[in-house]
Amino acid sequence: MSINISQSTQFKIRNLKLITKLGIQEIGGIYQELNIYDSMFMTCMRGDILIQDAIGLASKLTLDGSEYITMEISKSDEPANSATVINKTFRIYKLGNRSNLNQNSELYILYFISEEMIYSMQKKLNQSFKGIYSQIAKKVLNDILKVPVNKIGIVDETKGIHTVIIPNLSPFDTLEWLIKRSVSNENLPNLFFFENKYGYNFVSLSTLVKLPVTTNINFEPKNIGTLKGEEFYGARDMSLNSQFDLMENISNGVYAGKFIGIDPLTRKVTTSKIDYLQTYSRADGHLNKNPNFTSGKNREDKDSAQMYDSKVSLYAFETTRDASSWIQKNEVQTGKIIDDTHSYVFQRAPILTNLMQTTIHLNVPGNFAFTSGTVVNLKMPSRAVKTNTDSVDNTLNGKYIITAARHIIKGDIHETVIEVVTDSTNKSFTVNQTSDVQKAVKR
């Protein structure tokens, strides 16, 4: 990619307009700040724009929520389909924080969101579907929300054929409902539904961790006057929000737990023990070499993966109905509508908790290629006197997934704040304990 720029934070607004019932209004010269957000935990992209209005725009256009904002912003002169360009139209849904700046001008914020959200809020689904959850998700996106093909990103195939009745939910709520019950081809309930720069995604964590690294983010000293080397991908600020939280991990069943299933129809109770290896043992299922795990042992001389009472989930369970002769005879239709609750009720929370265990916020030069669901590599230097063996911090160095991005454009600066997380580490891992640790546990 060739970018003809002199500073890593510079940008070019090719198009920034309000589309209203009274016509099109160029606002590139009157905005003060533009923020665009996307996240793996938000169904769609959204943002806000601060307007300094000295021409009475709000009153002349009688803004009422029927407007759209269209934008095309790039680093310089790249093609419109370049990774560093955003070209998108949003729906204005709110005017707020309106205040007088002086006698001749005022400030206010226009809030915008992907148009599909407005349409979704105006519809409710109360119908049955049969098939795998990913096929149902495609039907909701294509047939109900009418999302264009070029706005649909990754849709992963899920396991299990289901007959479901959507209980009067909006299309977006339906997709969230499906996500929480879907199981990937790796038998893991680790799917996400979100919109990023590339479209709407119904994708598993297993797929995301296998994506190629989009860029290396370095932490070397910066010279913002001239762009050399990797300064375009250099972090300007870093905040380590969390590296581990043992108590949260235990309470959410990251290391071990128990699922108790009760079938009110057959009156059977099933108990399943779930440990760390069952969920995280796949070699290709992590971003880095070693999964996050604590090797500490407790007073029973057991590690965390052996303590199944850490979290107990009690839920309706239907899988035993296949072997019931009474159901085969009396309730063939309704009795055999089976939801694999044992596959997702317990497991989803520990997967998400483990993913968010190491969370870092980074401030980097503005770049629309930084979008949720993509993978970056952090070149984290060791914060100590350097030797030949400790030039990098292997507790933080490695691959991360971007879970959220905020693009901030104001004045002549475009900066991006990203949240990156990882479920694993490149540090050496051992389950052996020193005698000092063992003594401390037994005190």
Image (spheres, rainbow, N blue to C red):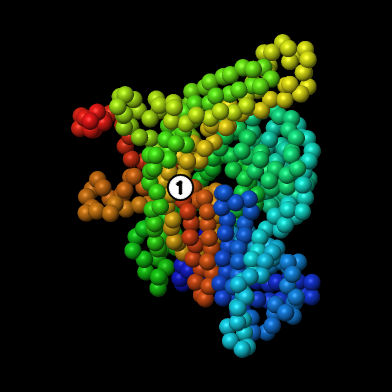
Query: In the image, what residue occupies the spot 67% across and 58% down?
Result: 114
Query: In the image, what residue occupies the spot 60% across and 72% down?
Result: 97
Front-most of residues 420 and 156: 420
439 relative to 218 in the view: left or right: left
Does residue 434 appear in this view? no
* Amino acid at the residue labelled 1: Val
- Describe the element under mark 1 as helix, strand or loop: strand
Work out which residue is located at the far bottom of the displayed protein and give it.
103
**Image quadrant of residue 161?**
top right
Picture coordinates of residue 301 (x, y %)?
30, 24
Query: In the image, what residue occupies the spot 54% across and 40% down?
Result: 205
How busy is the neighbourhood of tag 1: few (under 14 within 10 Å), some, or many (20 plus)?
many
Above or below: residue 57 compared with residue 375: below
Above or below: residue 82 compared with residue 63: above
Above or below: residue 358 compared with residue 20: above
| Residue under pointer 1 | 421
443 relative to 21 in the view: left or right: left
Picture coordinates of residue 388 (x, y %)?
23, 48
Front-most of residues 404 and 436: 436
Does residue 410 appear in this view? yes
**Image quadrant of residue 25?**
bottom right
Front-most of residues 129 and 80: 129
